[in-house]
Amino acid sequence: MKKIIILFTVLLLTGCGVGTTRNSKNNSQHHNIYMNTDSKCAGIKRVSKKYKETNPKDMLEKVDYCFIGKIKNFKDVEIYENGKIKTLMSISIESTIKGDVTGDIEIYRDGGRSGINEYVNYPKDTCLDKNKLKSIPDKMKESCYIEVVPDAYFQAKEGEEYMFFVKNKKQMEIYNDAYGMLKILDDKNLENVYTNKKYKISEIS
């Protein structure tokens, strides 16, 4: 399921759920105000999606590339059709299962984070109501963002190894996004972090 969350990091308390963290360097307090899009604070309907589960063997037949690699870092974010968001990842390829691809490459994955103003200025219609976003106070717009990510990508981290299933569309993209990245557990086993289902590397490659 995709979650669309608006995160406000401000020094004001609004009563919408406050988490306090202490900066050990200067001992000052900072307040992080989290506002869910289906709450009265944001007034925006939550958009959700369930992915159709795909067997890794079936994915292997449908993709252009399959390889094991490490996430180096998350890079640029792009807003596209219907106001969806995707993020560019830099990947260091360690071994190839299908396709001729080596070295370091960049691929897109579904989900990501955008500033409120950038999202509002997107020239086409979006799944979120821009008028409601415009009504957010300017002071808060400066320190908030829209985040659209599948649950799995709250767990995907830089430096971790995955088996990537990739289609070459207008650009390189993860196939059937929530199921197209399987986490490497060890030299024999994989895990789908979206479903926690385990697979054997030998059964796929």
Image (cartoon, rainbow, N blue to C red):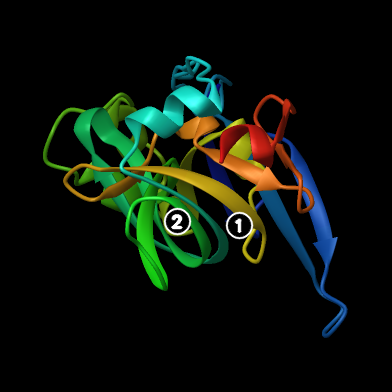
**Which residue: 60% across, 51% down?**
162
Categorize mark 1 by other alpha carbons within 10 Å: few (<14), some (14-19), many (20+): some
The amino acid type, in three-letter code, at marker 2 is Lys
**Which residue: 74% across, 28% down?**
196
Residue position marked by numbered label 1 in the rendering: 10
Residue 143 in the image, given as x and y percentages of width and height: 50, 58
Q: Where the C terminus falls, by quadrant? A: top right
Locate residue 161 relative to residue 93 in the image: left or right: right
Question: Residue 31 is drawn in which quadrant?
Answer: bottom right
Locate residue 185 relative to residue 37 in the image: left or right: right
Nearer to us in this view, 162 or 201:
201
Nearer to us in this view, 81 or 6:
81
C-alpha distance separating marks 2 and 1? 9 Å
> Which disc is residue 54 wearing?
none
Categorize mark 2 by other alpha carbons within 10 Å: few (<14), some (14-19), many (20+): few
The answer to whether the residue labelled 2 contacts the one labelled 1, judged by CB atoms less than 8 Å apart, is yes
Q: How many numbered callouts?
A: 2
Q: Earlier in the sequence, mark 2 or mark 1?
A: 1
Residue position marked by numbered label 2 in the rendering: 139
